[in-house]
Amino acid sequence: MSVAVAIFVKTPGLSALKTRLWPNLGREAAERLHMACAEAVASVVAEAGRRHGMTAYWAVAEENATAHWPGFPCVEQGAGSLGERMARVYRRMYERHGAAILIGADAPQIEVRHLAEADAWLRAASAHLAIGPAEDGGFWLFGGNRRLDDTAWLQPRYSAPSTAVEFVEALRGQGDWLELERLRDIDTVADIGPVRERLAALADATAEQSHLMEQLGRLDDIAERCA
């Protein structure tokens, strides 16, 4: 058994992304930010893979867009709602590896220690599940080491203040839970400053995280004017 880590991404120019940032940053700047966040997350996942043996993948939203995402093997999310797409990717990763972690590109301040903690938990012989709650009520990470009922992914209301709570409830009885540190996603300009501060406090930031921190610093002035 090994642990797969699938990073969920959308491709600029092929999907609308970071739309809540468009009014303040513009579409192109929001897309550049998404790519910088994805690169920062990928750099941490790659380092975690080197240290702990996890296998990284891009989980790409669009059909025939995998050429846009080098560095890791790609899987397509496929059609459907977010819950349907996560269920599909999780099932594929579980079948290949025996344990799977799903993360997005919205919390670029993640650290190797977060992934290492989830990895160690999921390598247990017993049924284990892991969640990284987000400050907005969603979650930035989910992991499991058992086949899950696809219908559980469809029960939560996504992008709601209670998403993580509802998802945990939907999976009640399917394994013991590990709750990781609560992190803040970058969804609006109000998130830019706090995430930048968290990146600045990292003792072992990757080069990609440091680059993102500089980019967020340039955007922070815009965020302050919009506050």
Image: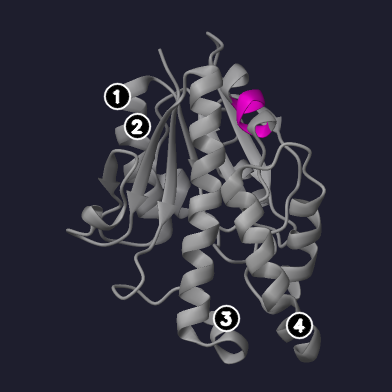
Q: Quadrant of residue 5?
A: top left
Task: Specify whether residue 166 is in view.
Answer: no
Q: Cβ–Cβ below 8 Å for labels 1 and 2? A: yes
Dot 4 alpha-carbon crowd within 10 angstroms: few under 14, some 14 to 19, many 20 or more: few
Name the secondary structure under disc 1. helix
Q: Nearer the viewer, residue 143 or 112?
A: 112
Q: CA distance from mark 4 to mark 1?
A: 45 Å
Magenta stretch contains residue 190: no
Dot 2 alpha-carbon crowd within 10 angstroms: few under 14, some 14 to 19, many 20 or more: many
Magenta part of the chain? 114-118
Q: Which residue is mark 2?
A: 93
Q: Nearer the viewer, residue 224 or 59?
A: 224
Q: Cβ–Cβ below 8 Å for labels 3 and 2? A: no
Q: Main secondary structure of the magenta part?
A: helix
Point out the tag, 3 or 4, that comes first from the N-terminus.
3
Q: Which residue is mark 4?
A: 221
> On the picture, is 32 further left or further right than 111?
left
Magenta stretch contains residue 116: yes
Q: How many marks?
A: 4
Q: Which residue is mark 3?
A: 20
Inspect the image, locate mark 3, and give the three-letter code of the amino acid beneath it: Arg
> On the picture, is 153 further left or further right than 187?
left
Name the secondary structure under disc 2. helix
Q: Is residue 143 above or below residue 200?
A: above
> On the picture, is 158 further left or further right than 137?
left
Q: Residue at x 64, y 32 (%)?
A: 112
Q: Is residue 193 above or below residue 83?
A: below
Q: Which residue is mark 1?
A: 96
